[in-house]
Image (cartoon, helix red, strand yellow):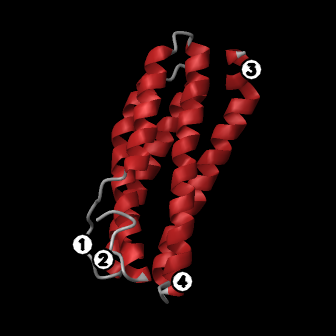
Amino acid sequence: MGLFTRDIKTLDDLFVHTLQDVYYAENQITKALPKMIAKATDPQLKQGFETHLRETEGQIKRLEQVFQMHGHQPKAVDCPAIDGIIKETNETAGEVADKDVLDAALIAAAQAVEHYEITRYGSLIAWAKRLGRDDCAGVLQQTLDEEKATDKRLTDMAEAQVNRKAA
């Protein structure tokens, strides 16, 4: 089911489809983060990625909870956006020889992921509220708050040390 197909007829259909999309994305992120951890050379960045991997595993559990609360089995649909971001990350990381520049590139890639997730969770929360599912919105809000906090930590790390070293 594509985002702009006739299979999505209602806001509820769109809500469920987007849950499936972000469920796929979070699962792909759990596969990509160990590679990013292995490539990162800055100890604080490495630790930040390890923390985010644990958070992402919790976010997957929360998504499964929202699926169940909404009367659906957890299911993923392909998310070309996250696949593209991860592919670009892998390609860029393979091209950067300077380890300090690589760390800066990894932060930028991680923030691309965070920004994608922030838009998805923001939309899901708005739709859940419109559908009268404040219970689902509350669970999703926890994840949105984590995504925003991770994005801020990445920005702070980049500005305080990583970008300076890369320059």
Disc 2 marks which amino acid? Answer: Gln
- Sequence-wise first label, 2 or 4: 2
- Sequence-wise first label, 2 or 1: 2
Mark 2 is surrounded, within 10 Å at the Cα level, by few (under 14), some (14 to 19) or many (20 or more) other residues, namely: few
Name the quarter where the C terminus is drawn: top right
The residue singled out by tag 3 in the image is 164
- Sequence-wise first label, 1 or 4: 1
Report how far apart the C-alphas of labels 2 and 3 lie in the structure.
46 Å
Report how far apart the C-alphas of labels 2 and 4 lie in the structure.
17 Å
* 100 over 14 or under it: above or below: above
Residue 56 x %, y %: 43, 51
Residue 116 x %, y %: 53, 52
Residue drawn at 45 percent across, 78 percent down: 136
Contact flag, marks 2 and 1 (Cβ < 8 Å): yes
Mark number displayed over residue 68 = 2
Mark 1 is surrounded, within 10 Å at the Cα level, by few (under 14), some (14 to 19) or many (20 or more) other residues, namely: few
Mark number displayed over residue 73 = 1
Looking at the image, can residue 42 be seen? no
Looking at the image, can residue 155 be seen? yes
